[in-house]
Image (cartoon, coloured by chain):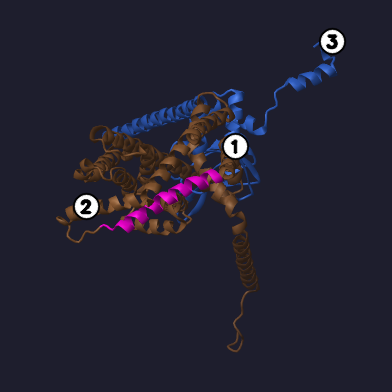
Amino acid sequence: MSEKSKISYPLFESFKDKLKPKRSQAQMALSQVNIFGRLSWQEIKIVESAVHIRTFAPNEAIFRQGDPGSGMYIIIEGRVGIFLDIPLQGPKKLSELGEGDFFGEIALLDESPRTASATALESCTIIGFYRPDLMDILKIKPAIGGKIILSLSEVLATRLRFTNSELVKVSHQLEEMIETQDHE
Amino acid sequence: MSSRDPVQIAPQSVRLFHQSLLKTLIYFFSLIVILAAAYKALPLVMDALFLLVIASILTAILNPLVDRLESSGIKRIWGALMVFGGIFALLGTGIVRGIPTLLTEISRIKDMIQQQSATDSLNSMITDINLKIAQYVPSFKLDTETLSNLSSQFFGQLGSILASALDTLTTIVFILIITMFFLVDGARMMKGLIGMVPNRYFEMSLNISYKTKKQLTNFLRGQLLAALGVGIQSIIGLSLLNWIFDANISGVFLIGSIAGMANMIPFIGPFMGMAPAIVVSLFNNLGDPVAASNFYYIFHIIGMFFIVQMIDNNVISPIVVSGSMEMHPLTVILLILIGSQLGVLGMFLAVPAWGISKVIVHEVYQGLKGHHLI
């Protein structure tokens, strides 16, 4: 790099900084979630006005297994543990999620009970995006709601394809096992 | 441990017991203080609370319209202003053109009822009706004084309601301003309120508030549409009676509006809508032999309202009114009796108010049950 290019122009830099769009932490977190991937910054700003930013103390439950599901969570700060409550054995840790991770997005579509519990492992700031918020967006800003639903459908389609391929693999393995047993 | 020693309690358990007792006592006294403060402050905030409740109901009715305008790309504030412009235009037309006509009509009927000559003609008409009906129902007896008092009271009260409605213009303006704020900023206010709920109850509160709002909007919209349907049908029906049978029923729009509003009260409402039409027909046709031979068109009016009810119950209500209004007739009668303590307006509002409360209690109960809190 030449010496010339290293020269900074404070006035120009400050002007450039001022022109840079200011994004909130919540907007940045939302933009990283795949179901908001199709949205422009302007649209993300509208979603931001609909979501709820909540803080959780260490070991505080975000939701409990069996509760009716009502929305998804995006972690802005902190770590969250996903636990499966096994009768007579107590909770079993399934995974640990951190900044930028999200969970519970399927609850945006139906109210079926949560299959696991989520607990804050440390002090957390989390975005909650719930079905009522999605419904309001669909009613008032149908174009944005449509994009979110489309992305959500893509997530489901990908998972369904993955589950199907896994099922095919398992059934092949099962057939092979049965054939081997028959030969023996 | 020897047998003489007293029972030992672990010090930690004692501490926990004391802490828990202290906590319970603090909660208990706080609750008493809050309840006493609420009891003392209630009369002071009652008026404001009334305005807020009416504004909330208006918001629930108008919100879908503003939402629709916003979804078509119009800014929310402009949408709300457009809806308000429409309301003011309607109210203005109603006040300038409708109210004086209605008041004239009411005072004309009231005068006619109180006139001695009219009462004399009424005597002969009632004797005629009593004689004719006694053939089928021997115990039936219609009394002039009762009929006159009832009619005078009914129209007198109606007049006073309209007059007081004009007097409380300030209240209406306040309600409209609050409604405007709720329409434009209601979602943000609600978000702020729900944001104060602790994490444990947050999801549940959000769901309950959303479902209650949805149910309430559907319920109010359904009730209003059904009332509008019955009102329009009654106006058409009464106009047809005037046109085909020359029934001479005046104040068709007023009677239609009463029938529409009364329809919000199940079982009793249709009769309340029918009564003014019968009274007007009786007084307008006094001394008319053709009308007398047709029982002063009472059966025509009953038949017409019966058809309106048939259409409402089988076509309109199933489409527009949600099932939340299903009530036992005894509940309705009790509610109307309780509402009557607050006058005619109380009778009108008792059943819809019960319907709204039912929706809220149902949603809260379902929410609490779903989250295993009860």
Decide: is A115 above or below B69.
Answer: below
Q: Which amino acid does the dot numbered 3 rest on? A: Lys
Crowding at mark 2 (Cα within 10 Å: few <14, some 14-19, many 20+): some
Q: Which amino acid does the dot numbered 2 rest on? A: Ile
Q: Quadrant of the N terminus of chain B?
A: bottom right
Q: CA distance from mark 3 to mark 1?
A: 54 Å
Residue B355 pos. (x, y %): 41, 50
Crowding at mark 1 (Cα within 10 Å: few <14, some 14-19, many 20+): few
Label 3: state its secondary structure. Answer: helix
Q: Please name whichever residue, B228 or B292, is drawn nearer the observer in this view of the structure.
A: B292
Tint of chain B:
brown
Crowding at mark 3 (Cα within 10 Å: few <14, some 14-19, many 20+): few
Chain drawn blue in the picture = A
> What residue lies at 27% left-to-right and 54% top-to-bottom?
B123
Label 1: state its secondary structure. Answer: helix
Question: Is disc 1 in contact with disc 2, using a CB cutoff of under 8 Å?
Answer: no
Query: For the stretch drawn in magenta, what is the main secondary structure?
Result: helix
Label 2: state its secondary structure. Answer: helix
Q: Which residue is mark 2?
A: B129
Q: Which residue is mark 1?
A: B185
> What residue lies at 60% left-to-right and 41% top-to-bottom?
B189
Q: Which residues are magenta?
A: B142-167
Q: Can residue B260 be seen by looking at this rendering?
A: yes
Extreme residue in the left direction:
B135
Residue A6 pos. (x, y %): 83, 15
Q: Which residue is mark 3?
A: A4
In the picture provided, is B5 more to the left or to the right than A67?
right
> What residue lies at 79% left-to-right and 19% top-to-bottom?
A15
